[in-house]
Amino acid sequence: MTDQPTPLPDGLDWDGAERRAVVIIGTGPAGFTAALYAARAGLDPLVVQGSAPGGQLTTTTDVENFPGYPDGVMGPDLMQDLEKQAVRFGAELRWGTVTHVDLSESPHRLVVDEATPLLADAVIGATGASAKYLGLDNEKRLLGRGVSACATCDGAFFRDEEIAIVGGGDTAMEEALFLTRFAKTVHVIHRRDAFRASQIMQDRVLQNGKVQVHWNTVVTDVLGDDAVTGLRLEDTETGEARELPVTGFFVAIGHQPNTDIFRGWLDMDDAGYVLTHPDSTHTNVEGVFVCGDAQDHVYRQAVTAAGTGCMAAIDAERWLAERDVIDEPRTETEYHAAPAEDSETHRPIAESEA
Amino acid sequence: MVKLDVDNNPQSAMKYVIRSIPSLLFFKDGKPVDQMVGVVPKRILAEKLDTLAAQAA
């Protein structure tokens, strides 16, 4: 892993480039909420959608823990609602992916799809996270040909077939259960002798008649020429190798932040999550704000992503006002200080007393 | 260019072993000659079409 930024492509017309006060990168709950707030503040934000518009929620089914939907909501419907709400207040959506950034000076330089230069006074990074893979060559080669990291997207293509899923967390349990709707057998492969998923999810999986668990087992290779035909497995205790004939292989071993474009510019932890200043979305670079799963390895919920998206828009707005790019912050909130409080009781002191 | 909804055409989806969508199949003389899966940037698509066209010529 290098910490050198990727250089910008040559020959771009930076003098003729479009300049925006706020560019938001990403369209998950964080990006759309940042867009909503920035749009309502009159900042005319441009939202570059990225390679997976709508983000991770577009690959889920029911979302039952987003406040305001008492009966639950389908992930894609929720994302459409968030998009509509941001667009209603004037956020401009643009198809494309930010492939390069240069954050060395303000306005910051962004490149869309390796070809289109874009200047941004404030950048809001809401690039999210995506599924991790095992990192096997054949796993990559057979991606979309039986290898998948999204049970809800691809599960239905494996009706009455033998399939396998690797992982041991809640997501793996959820996906394994979902896959039992279609598959003949779902082989759950886990490297340890116990899952780390919540008890309720484990029980559901272990009690499902279509599930067969392979404990203390790792996947060492994915087999098949044009499509997956099986897996090579290894017992972690005996070292014994065996083959498991399956036509589908689902990977559910966690997520990684999509922060490669910021590498070398923004401070990150070892896993690639962008480090933000405490209680804010400010990064080590002035005018660059990061929100959602790109900076959050703890909560990673749609609602927390939306929350930090809101913070990023307000942080950006205030920063732009300080630099006179806009005249004054327009979102009604107390920016600079908490209300004066009594040092002993920690109760707010009314203005008349203060 | 033909677009096919896998939900309404499960037999075609099975025939061409579609395992993920979007899947993009390139045909020559009625036979698939290449395949791309997932969202693909325009530049990569253009390169693929150029390569296939050059092979066909």
Image (spheres, coloured by chain):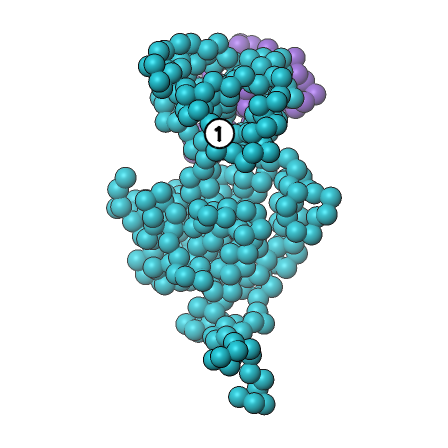
Q: In the rendered image of this protein, does residue A239 appear above or below residue A30?
A: above
Q: Residue furthest front?
A: A344
Asked whether residue A295 is in view, the answer is yes
Q: Position of residue A337 (x, y in %)?
A: 48, 76
- Depth check, front residue: B31 or A88: A88
* Residue positioned 26% across, 42% down in the render: A2
Left-right relation of B15 to A240: right
Q: Tell me the colour chain B is drawn in.
A: purple
* Residue positioned 50% across, 12% down in the render: A246
Q: Residue furthest bottom?
A: A352
* Residue positioned 34% across, 48% down in the render: A269
Chain where mark 1 sits = A
Q: Which chain is cyan?
A: A
- Depth check, front residue: B13 or B40: B13
- Depth check, front residue: A150 or B29: A150
Q: Position of residue A327 (x, y in %)?
A: 50, 75
- Under tag 1, what secondary structure? loop
Q: Position of residue B45 (x, y in %)?
A: 46, 29
Q: Position of residue B52 (x, y in %)?
A: 43, 19
Q: Residue furthest right?
A: A71
Asked whether residue A122 is in view, the answer is no
Q: In the rendered image of this protein, does residue A328 appear above or below residue A24?
A: below
How many neighbours does mark 1 have within 10 angstroms: few (below 14), some (14-19), or many (20 or more)?
Answer: some
Q: How many marks?
A: 1
* Residue positioned 54% across, 39% down in the render: A56
Residue behind mark 1? A195
Left-right relation of A128 to A79: left
Q: The disc labelled 1 sits on which kind of residue?
A: Phe
- Depth check, front residue: A52 or A194: A194
Which quadrant does the N terminus of chain A fall into?
Answer: top left
